[in-house]
Image (spheres, rainbow, N blue to C red):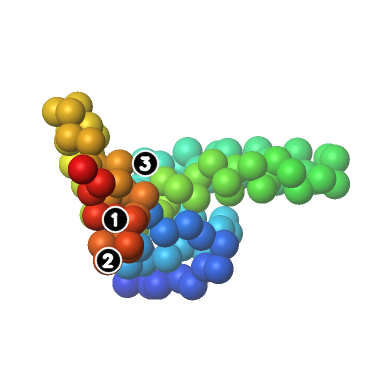
Amino acid sequence: MDGEVYADGDSTDPPYGVRIRIERTGPAIRAALDEERRAEFETDFRAALSKADDTLDLAAVQAVLDRWWPLALLGANPEIRAGAEQDRRRVEMGDPDVIVETWFPAGHPQGSRIA
């Protein structure tokens, strides 16, 4: 990614925070993916562009961007994946607090556990 940070008003922040935002565009998503996934994204994107060329409908292109954008976001922010994995392990161990902590950030009035 070469340290590029993209601003994106069309994003959802996971509870772990997003340090690097990724625009929901082909070039931004491509830049955020690792080499192996980048090739797969390019194949999907080009196929969608070809379909759009035939139908004059950008829905297929938008669907590819929607499908790949979360993966690009995770690739650019590995701490999100690490936090989600930690939460998954806590849920498997039966820790009910993980749901409250995920839905309500620290300091939120409903974030304190109700006994």
Q: Depth check: give the residue in front, 90 or 3.
A: 90
The answer to the question of whether label 1 and label 2 lie on touching residues, with beta carbons closer than 8 A, is yes
**Residue 107 badge:** 2
Residue 59 placement: quadrant: top right
Mark toward the start of the polypeptide (3 vs 1): 3
Q: Check disc 1 and report the residue beneath it.
A: 111
Q: Check disc 3 and report the residue beneath it.
A: 36
**Residue 84 badge:** none
Residue visible at 52% across and 63% down in the picture: 23
Q: Position of residue 58 (x, y in %)?
A: 76, 48
Asked if one can make out residue 15 in the rendered structure from this viewpoint, the answer is no
As displayed, is residue 5 above or below residue 80? below
- Horizontal side of residue 86 vs 16, given as left or right: left
Give the foreground label among 2 and 3: 2
Q: Depth check: give the residue in front, 102 or 13.
A: 102
Residue visible at 48% across and 57% down in the picture: 12
Q: Position of residue 67 (x, y in %)?
A: 54, 41
Mark toward the start of the polypeptide (2 vs 3): 3
Q: Depth check: give the residue in front, 115 or 41.
A: 115
User: SS of the residue at dot 3?
Assistant: helix
